[in-house]
């Protein structure tokens, strides 16, 4: 059995996607900062018959994040699918004219250094398997910068560039990198952007392996 690992586990999209991949037969590893939070999520998945474990780590702490991903592979088996979708902090979203270089340190660490750390940790295992999927979930500012959300707009753009380069560089190795853009809020009544619908989209990106960038719904003008 191979493993699906979710970096940035939460009760909405994260839990729905973990349930979708777990139902398909993958072991499920959840990474988030809070051990107590992870325990609640894994308990819910286990009640559905899904093998799930939590691994506490902060995406802003590269050594801890690498260690957690190494522990995942040792405990549950090689990572075949990595989903990187932590929710940015509110203080990343300052207006562009109020943003300093210091204000960009954490957003770039969160949305660029975090993904690079994760990919470097799981890529050797994917290569050994001969297959893998790297899934990146971003808001609309990844493709349409918002002047009131400068930190995430800049950092998401950097993450998008990195993910696109992975898509091109790894295709020949049967490792598929894809990005899902969710322009609006993720909530149960959001239609195409509800957690369950998005979970199905992400599972389809893994199985169908078609193209790099996908949209949950059309971007508003």
Image: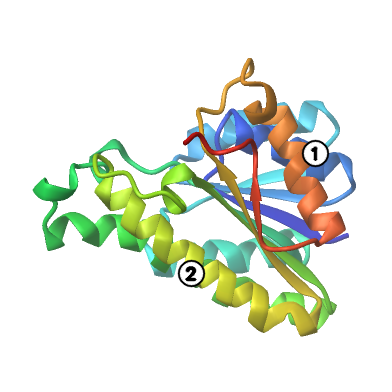
Seen as rendered, the residue at the extreme front is: 221
How busy is the neighbourhood of tag 2: few (under 14 within 10 Å), some, or many (20 plus)?
Answer: some
Is residue 168 among the parts visible in the rendering? yes
Q: Quadrant of the N terminus?
A: bottom right
Looking at the picture, tell me which residue is in the foreground, 86 or 208: 208
What's the residue at 24%, 39% (across, down)?
148
Q: Are marks 1 and 2 in contact (CB under 8 Å)?
A: no
Residue identifier under label 1: 20
Vertically, is 194 above or below 58?
Answer: above
User: Residue 200 at x, y = what percent?
Assistant: 78, 38
Direction from residue 157 to residue 43 in the image, left or right:
right
Quadrant in which residue 68 is drawn: bottom right
What's the residue at 42%, 56% (across, down)?
156
Quadrant in which residue 212 is drawn: bottom right
Q: CA distance from mark 1 to mark 2?
A: 27 Å
Q: Secondary structure at mark 2?
A: helix
């Amino acid at each position: 059995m191979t493993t699906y690992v979710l970096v940035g586990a939460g009760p909405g999209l994260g839990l729905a996607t973990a349930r979708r991949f777990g139902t398909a037969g993958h072991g499920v590893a959840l990474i988030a900062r809070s051990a107590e939070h992870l325990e609640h999520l894994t308990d819910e998945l286990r009640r559905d018959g899904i093998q799930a474990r939590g691994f506490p780590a902060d995406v802003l702490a590269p050594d801890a994040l690498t260690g957690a991903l190494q522990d995942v592979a040792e405990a549950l088996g090689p990572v075949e699918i990595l989903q990187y979708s932590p929710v940015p902090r509110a203080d990343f979203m300052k207006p562009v004219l109020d943003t300093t270089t210091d204000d960009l340190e954490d957003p770039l660490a969160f949305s660029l250094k975090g993904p690079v750390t994760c990919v470097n940790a799981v890529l050797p295992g994917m290569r050994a398997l001969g297959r893998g999927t790297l899934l990146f979930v971003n808001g609309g500012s990844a493709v349409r910068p918002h002047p009131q959300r400068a930190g995430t707009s800049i950092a998401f753009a950097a993450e998008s560039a990195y993910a696109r380069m992975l898509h091109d560089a790894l295709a020949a190795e049967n490792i598929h990198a894809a990005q899902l853009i969710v322009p609006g809020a993720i909530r149960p009544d959001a239609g195409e952007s509800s957690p369950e619908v998005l979970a199905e989209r992400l599972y389809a990106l893994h199985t169908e392996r078609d193209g790099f960038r996908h949209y949950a719904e059309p971007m508003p003008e």
